[in-house]
Image (tube, rainbow, N blue to C red):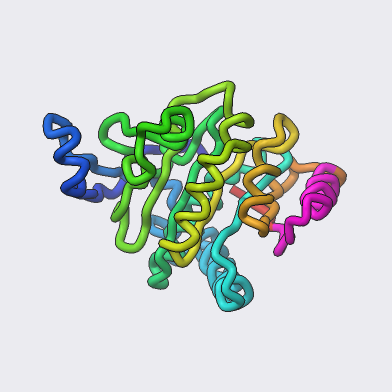
Amino acid sequence: MSDNQDGQLLDSPADSEKQTMAPSQPEVQFHLSDQVVITFGAGSPEGESIGALRTQLMSQHLKEGRRALAICSPSKAGRTSFLAVNLAVALTQAGVRTLLVDTNMRAPHVQSYIVPSRPVRGLADCLEDSAIEFGEVIHDDVLPSLSVVFAGDPTDKSQELLAGPRFKALVDLCMREYDMILFDTAPTNACADAQIVAMLAHYGLVVARKNMSYVNDIKTLIADMRANRVEVIGTVINEM
């Protein structure tokens, strides 16, 4: 199924600090793609599956006080962004204050599911420039209880940025502010970015694609994550 950016229009009012900093900037609005099946496909098999995953996550992860989860796949075929966005929206529908962070600064995809009406600053911007405050890249109220950090423009410095102290400081801050943080990550067969993110989150969810992911690749990813002391809470088969 191809990504379609036509969808629901959602307002995200800029806070007073952002208005002061950039008074000439128009208010950011967000469109949801119809690939956000938990909203547009309510009652569909895909929507029901996302809802069931949310229930398991809330009862077996959040209930234990765990506040972060890295969503990882060995290849881009896994479509981690599809799962990350839909799961984030599903959690907010249950009243969980959720932050979705796109850490795939090599080939960002979250913005094709949650589409800002104009270019906005992202993770790469604040990690590269210490003058940019974290609050400038955390877009609150994209949906009720949903905040998003977009990846920003693609960069070849992503591994260096994710391994630096500013990303850890951002994660530590957000752990105190949100009930749940979901990290979308780059494919692990291309780089070590996802492993860095998973180590900071301490927990990972592995995504495989039906008829496209290789069993040995999944086993290798799980073994590598466990070797890095990341607790793998499960594996999801993505049929989309």
Residue 223 is covered by the magenta coloring:
yes
- Number of on-image labels: 0
Residue 85 percent across, percent down from the top left: 48, 51
Residue 86 to residue 60: above or below: above
| Quadrant assignment, res 187 | top right
Residue 162 percent across, percent down from the top left: 59, 37
> What residue do we see at 73% from left, 40% from top?
74
Residue 17 percent across, percent down from the top left: 20, 45
Whether residue 72 sits left or right of residue 134 in the image: it is right
- Residue interval drawn in magenta: 217-235
> What residue do we see at 18% from left, 33% from top?
22
Tell me if I can see residue 55 in this picture: yes
Whether residue 229 sits left or right of residue 10 in the image: it is right
> What residue do we see at 72% from left, 62% from top?
234
Residue located farthest toward the left when viewing the structure as drawn: 24
Tell me if I can see residue 112 in this picture: no
The front one of 133 and 72 is 133
Whether residue 107 sits left or right of residue 129 in the image: it is right
Residue located farthest toward the right when viewing the structure as drawn: 216
> What residue do we see at 62% from left, 29% from top?
160
Residue 101 percent across, percent down from the top left: 48, 47
The front one of 212 and 229 is 229
The front one of 8 and 98 is 98
